[in-house]
Amino acid sequence: MKNFLSQKVTGLKPSGIRKFFDIVSEMKDAISLGVGEPDFDTPWFIRDEGIFSLEKGKTFYTSNSGLKDLRVEIADYMKRTQNISYCPDNEIVVTVGGSEAIDIALRAVINPDDEVIIPQPSYVSYEPCSVLAGAKPVIINLRAENEFRLKSEELLNAITGKTKVLILPYPNNPTGAIMERENLEEIARIVKEKDILVLSDEIYSELTYKDKHVSIASLDGMKERTVLINGFSKAYAMTGWRLGYACGAKEIIAQMTKIHQFAIMCAPTTSQYAAVQALKHGDDEVAKMRQAYNQRRRFLMEAFKEMGLECFEPYGAFYVFPCIKEFNMTSEEFATKLLMEEKVAVVPGTAFGDCGEGFLRISYAYSLDNLKVALSRINNFIQRLRNEN
């Protein structure tokens, strides 16, 4: 059987996120703080539009690039939030989640031997998608002392004559790190000088707690060399609706749409009708969810402070990335022992790159009641570890 399998695919490591949650699903009274999924229901006015579209029999294929009304709303959203002008006709494609957009963007631009720069810790799909597209991943190990921001000197050191794409994963999963305008301006200067493309994953753009998110595509000279990825799962609590989109130069979007056409045909029709309403009327609901996440974020940071657990303050997404190096255990060992002894599931930092060793990803996309119970168990666990040492 092994002769029938692709060496490229068999060589990929499975996602490090799911392991613990397969155990949790069968463990009584366990609390999971690992899945990056909002605990809010999709707002009713969005669900209503999906239901209405089904009642009206709107169950046919849309155009390959997505409903025209939805692409118009996406263009309007990008204009009012980032002051970037995209043409709905040829600079936007609607995809099955942001993950598909990442995949087809890389496949649309990569040639054999091209290099893709990936700052880590970061989302688990970037590296395998780069490999599957035929690229060589070049990893930049981000550092906690820099608040996990990409520094210009780190980027310069990673660029070679084969560099094609820089993946810019901010706001960041798993660290919650952000890039502010002045940070992005340094990166943009190098990107233009070295003539490379940016794939900017902005799926958490609505979930920032310090300043409003700034897209690198909004900076001078960067729209034409950026593929901007976004979607509806995080901001609008629409994970199961599986809807994302990409914005970029028409030449790149045309090739992405071609891949999407052959592999997918179109994104789910019901989800697209619902997403039109999300963009038209969802700002208030997004603001309410953002406020709730911020409250939870501040609760976790205060709890870590009381525990004496080191953690830089995140200002984006809905994750914290505490450091557990003091315990002289690997992230995998710590997470396993925590799950078995206290029935709390978190994700080892190494699931997001080797430089995540010594850290854990904890999601606060859960109710405060659940977070309080989980944090109490974590506190019991680490105090026990300290007493043992």
Image (tube, rainbow, N blue to C red):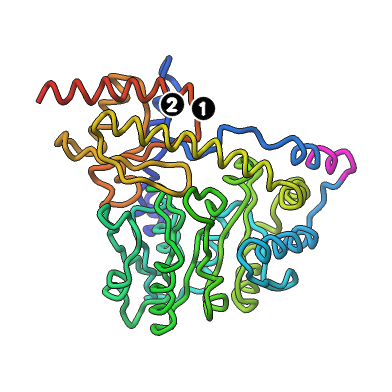
Q: Does the magenta run of residues contain 381? A: no
Whether residue 261 is visible to the viewer of this picture, yes or no, is no
> What residue do we see at 23% from left, 37% from top?
324
Q: Residues within 10 Å of mark 2 (few under 14, many from 20)?
A: many
The residue that label 2 is drawn on is 371
Q: Which residues are magenta?
A: 50-57
Q: Is residue 168 found left or right of 204 in the rendered image?
A: left
Residue 375 x/y as whole percent: 36, 25
> What residue do we see at 47% from left, 34% from top?
296
| Quarter holding residue 108 | bottom right
Query: Residue furthest toward the right?
Result: 56
Q: Is residue 94 found left or right of 203 in the rendered image?
A: right
Q: Amino acid at mark 2?
A: Leu
The residue that label 1 is drawn on is 367
Q: Amino acid at mark 1?
A: Ser
Q: Is residue 127 found left or right of 386 in the rendered image?
A: right
Query: 110 and 186: which one is in front?
Result: 186
Q: Is residue 268 above or below residue 118?
A: above
Residue 38 x/y as whole percent: 55, 37
* Prevailing SS of the magenta stretch: helix
